């Protein structure tokens, strides 16, 4: 790509500056009306959607899809940076400078003289260094985004608390707490109590997943995907028989579900 932006040829190398030039052109006075109309706020849903599409590609092991979705996510970052630059808020260089400085500061075992034994020790130092970047006397839990999915936020909160020793010693201890929370749900009287106890169960499940080194959001996405595939099998079987799902008994659907589980573990 030269000074004039033209059609991208097959196999043509694209530089970072060329990509940036495309974003600037889209936001120019004679650029794309849709891109020009966007703001930090209007782009929020797209940032979230693209992030989930990246996660889906990773879950499915689709590397070509991941390559494309990372580009879509990068587009969102570039649009936000371009909008901010136009409004005098910050520049793309500010974004790159801050993340580069942050990575160097948080990796003294790579860019400094600190020695570490393993990844666990790196994680402990990481939390300590992050805390130095916050205002004095701020909570170790501060900084977990309010709009973060609740289950993922639970694991993040628990990881931060565990980094200073506030943690169950053994997995069995957490499983015991889970049984206790289920019992409390069974004993709950009011609707409000049931909701509170159900929340405690989910929070404890997030702790179980963290202790087992399982990403709760990823595990649940995979469970959703399995359910969808297996339920689609039931729907396909119904269509093949020329009947409606509503006309099947629960026992018949359970039989098809068991069949789907064997075909789609």
Image (cartoon, rainbow, N blue to C red):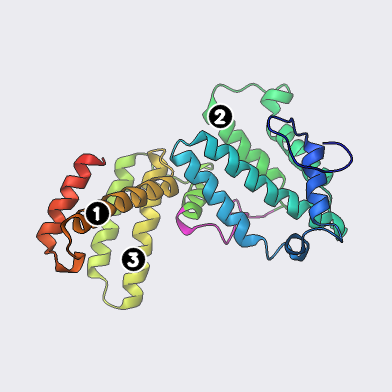
Q: Residues within 10 Å of mark 3 (few under 14, many from 20)?
A: many
Tell me the magenta residue range.
Answer: 137-151
Q: Residue at x 33, y 64 (%)?
A: 198
Q: For mark 3, what is the residue?
A: 197
Identify the residue position indicated by label 2 in the image: 121
The quarter holding residue 45 reads bottom right
Circle 1 packing at 10 Å, graded few (<14), some (14-19), many (20+), is few
Residue shown at the point (48%, 59%) measured from the top left:
150
Rounded to the nearest angstrom, the CA distance separating label 2 from label 1 is 51 Å
Q: Main secondary structure of the magenta part?
A: loop
Label 3 secondary element: helix
**Residue for point 45% across, 55% down:** 151
Q: Is residue 140 magenta?
A: yes
Residue hosting label 1:
236
Q: Is residue 133 left or right of residue 247?
A: right
Q: Position of residue 13 (x, y in %)?
A: 74, 30
Is residue 165 something one can see in this rendering?
Answer: no
Front-most of residues 100 and 66: 66
Residue 167 relative to residue 262: left or right: right
Which of the marked residues, 2 or 1, is nearer the chain's N terminus? 2
């Amino acid at each position: 790509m030269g000074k004039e932006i033209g059609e991208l040829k097959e196999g043509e190398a694209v530089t970072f500056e060329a990509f940036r030039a495309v974003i600037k052109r889209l936001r120019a006075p004679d650029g794309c009306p849709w891109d020009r109309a966007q703001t930090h706020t209007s782009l929020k849903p797209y940032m979230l959607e693209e992030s989930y599409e990246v996660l889906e590609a990773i879950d499915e092991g689709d590397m070509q899809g991941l390559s494309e979705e990372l580009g879509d996510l990068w587009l969102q970052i570039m649009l936000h940076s371009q909008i901010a630059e136009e409004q005098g808020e910050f520049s793309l260089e500010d974004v790159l400078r801050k993340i580069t400085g942050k990575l160097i500061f948080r990796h003294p075992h790579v860019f400094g003289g600190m020695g570490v034994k393993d990844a666990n020790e790196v994680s402990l130092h990481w939390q300590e260094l992050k805390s130095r970047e916050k205002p004095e006397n701020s909570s170790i839990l501060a900084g977990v985004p309010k709009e973060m999915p609740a289950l993922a936020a639970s694991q993040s909160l628990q990881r931060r608390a565990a980094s200073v020793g506030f943690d169950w010693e053994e997995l069995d201890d957490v499983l015991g707490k889970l049984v206790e929370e289920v019992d409390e749900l069974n004993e709950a009287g009011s609707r409000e109590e049931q909701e509170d106890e159900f929340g405690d169960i989910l929070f404890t499940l997030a702790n179980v997943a963290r202790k087992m080194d399982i990403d709760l959001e990823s595990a649940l996405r995979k469970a959703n995907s399995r359910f969808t595939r297996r339920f689609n099998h039931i729907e396909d079987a119904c269509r093949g028989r020329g009947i409606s799902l509503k006309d099947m008994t629960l026992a018949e659907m359970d039989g098809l579900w068991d069949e789907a589980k064997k075909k789609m573990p």
